[in-house]
Image: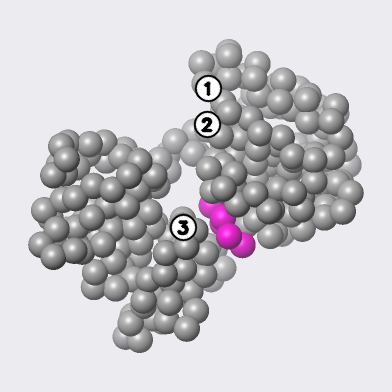
Amino acid sequence: MNIIICDDRIDDRKNVSDLLSDYGEKKNYEFTITEYDFGEQLCEDQSALEACQLLFLDINMQGMDGLKTAMRIKEKYPKLPVVLVTAYMNYALDGYKVKASRFMLKDNIADTIEECMDDLIAEINKNRRILEFRFVEGTIKLYADDIIYIETELHKNVFYTEKGTFQIYKKLDELENELKNMGFVRAHLSFLVNMKYITKISSYVMTLTTGKKIPVPKARYAQVKREYMLYKGEE
């Protein structure tokens, strides 16, 4: 699991990192932990954010504070679990504004980290459905949220995923039904897109985190935008 810790205090970053490492060792999880000093620095590293599965974010940072950082990141990665960490209890309500998954006080983080991680990992795993497909390349298991989009090309459908591209002889309508309620939207007759990877939809074009641009027909545009807003929790 890829975890990011963003805090301008090195001692606090190390404390969270050590606690996570201890938790991983105890529960037999493998974590890759990356640390950042400031919110601005983190927001600029889009490749790290795309790979991130859990973010620990200090609220009281110099420059761009944790709330502004979380808000900016959530605009692009609405489903990324964010844990807000602070030394002050009076910030707790602010966590709701940025749809934080958890709020933790630095004073008792050692006592609460295990329960917090148990809950978060259970939630993350619930959303990571494993699916099996019979591709031209062979039978392959994929996490649903590793599928970026599926495109119809001639008589095949091509899966563009975090693991590479795979071809399958199955109708897109069938694939859409198999992936129902897993965060996918039919952007076009030839495209089924994982909304996790959408950065914006405007002027009848859908832009993905990979830079790919997918046309959205006028007849589908309003429905596609509505589904995306619902996915982001904005409607």
Residue ID for mark 2: 1
Residue ID for mark 3: 210
Residue placed at 74% from the left, 49% from the top? 41
Is 211 displayed left or right of 2 in the figure? left
Mark 2 closeness class: few <14, some 14–19, many ≥20 residues within 10 Å: some
- Which one is earlier in the sequence, the residue at label 3 or at label 1? 1
Mark 1 closeness class: few <14, some 14–19, many ≥20 residues within 10 Å: few
- The secondary element bearing badge 3 is classed as loop
The amino acid on which the numbered mark 3 sits, given as a three-letter code, is: Thr
Mark 3 closeness class: few <14, some 14–19, many ≥20 residues within 10 Å: few
Measured in 3D between alpha carbons, the distance from the residue under mark 2 to the one under mark 1, in whole angstroms, is 6 Å
- Which one is earlier in the sequence, the residue at label 2 or at label 1? 2
Residue placed at 38% from the left, 54% from the top? 148
The amino acid on which the numbered mark 1 sits, given as a three-letter code, is: Glu
Q: Which tag is nearer the camera, tag 2 or tag 3?
A: 3
Residue ID for mark 1: 30
In the rendered view, how is the structure colored?
one colour
Q: Which tag is nearer the camera, tag 3 or tag 1?
A: 3
- The secondary element bearing badge 1 is classed as loop
- The secondary element bearing badge 2 is classed as loop
Is 75 displayed left or right of 193 in the figure? right
Residue 201 against residue 165 in the figure, above or below: below
Q: Range of the magenta residues?
A: 75-80
